[in-house]
Image: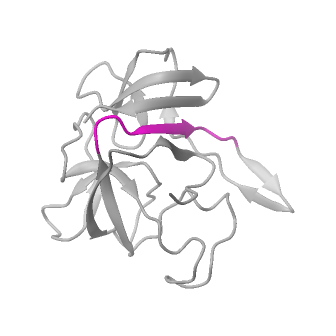
Amino acid sequence: MSDYGKNFGFRRSEPAVREGRLGVPDTGDFYQGDLVTHDPDNPGKLRKAAAGDPVVGGYTGLLIQEEGWDISSFGAPNVDSNNKGKVLNGKQAVVMTGPGLKIWLRNTDESQYHGRTFPAVNRADLTGVAIGDELSWDGEKYAKATTGAAVLRVTVAGDGYVEAVLLG
């Protein structure tokens, strides 16, 4: 598997089911590991899943875009790990599902490197999250499941960091 940046990655990527070569919208902020689904208003395109949407194999799952980071298939190569987690708009990606996929999510504060400032990235609201808890999607990030469908079960919880298993 490829390097997905500082805020998302796989601990176990099998049994993976990859659906697509589906288009990422031309606008908006999309990140590796966002919960996405097919856009019924734009065939062949993705959209972020709505709050509380469940994982549905072949339709709703994790956004993964592998091409273009280390090779120049989409333009100039991107060799900066601070930018790798952001998905390229207007390009192809896949929806990945498979019960048992194990991922990690990390929130990062604003940082500076060689005079450049990188914004904070908040992948999950981890307030009160503990091992065994379930996370759902709130439309922008993962959060402790209180309503809606749980999509992840937490296996490791730390300060701004979580590992979890995909439920669907």
The colour scheme used here is one colour
Which residue of the protein is positioned furthest toward the front in this rendering? 14
Identity of the residue drawn at 82% across and 57% down: 113
Identity of the residue drawn at 36% across and 66% down: 93
In the image: residue 127, left or right of residue 38 = right
In the image: residue 39, left or right of residue 92 = left
Identity of the residue drawn at 37% across and 55% down: 63
**Circle count:** 0
Residue 64 percent location from the top left of the image: 41, 58
Residue 137 percent location from the top left of the image: 34, 36
Identity of the residue drawn at 55% across and 21% down: 157
Depicted 19 relative to depicted 27: above or below: above
Depicted 40 relative to depicted 111: above or below: below
Quarter of the image for residue 168 reads top left
- Front residue of 39 and 33: 33
Residue 156 percent location from the top left of the image: 54, 23
Residue 57 percent location from the top left of the image: 19, 47
Which residue of the protein is positioned furthest toward the right in this rendering? 114
Residue 102 covered by magenta stretch: yes
* Magenta-drawn segment: 98-109
Residue 68 covered by magenta stretch: no
In the image: residue 85, left or right of residue 65 = right
Quarter of the image for residue 69 reads bottom right
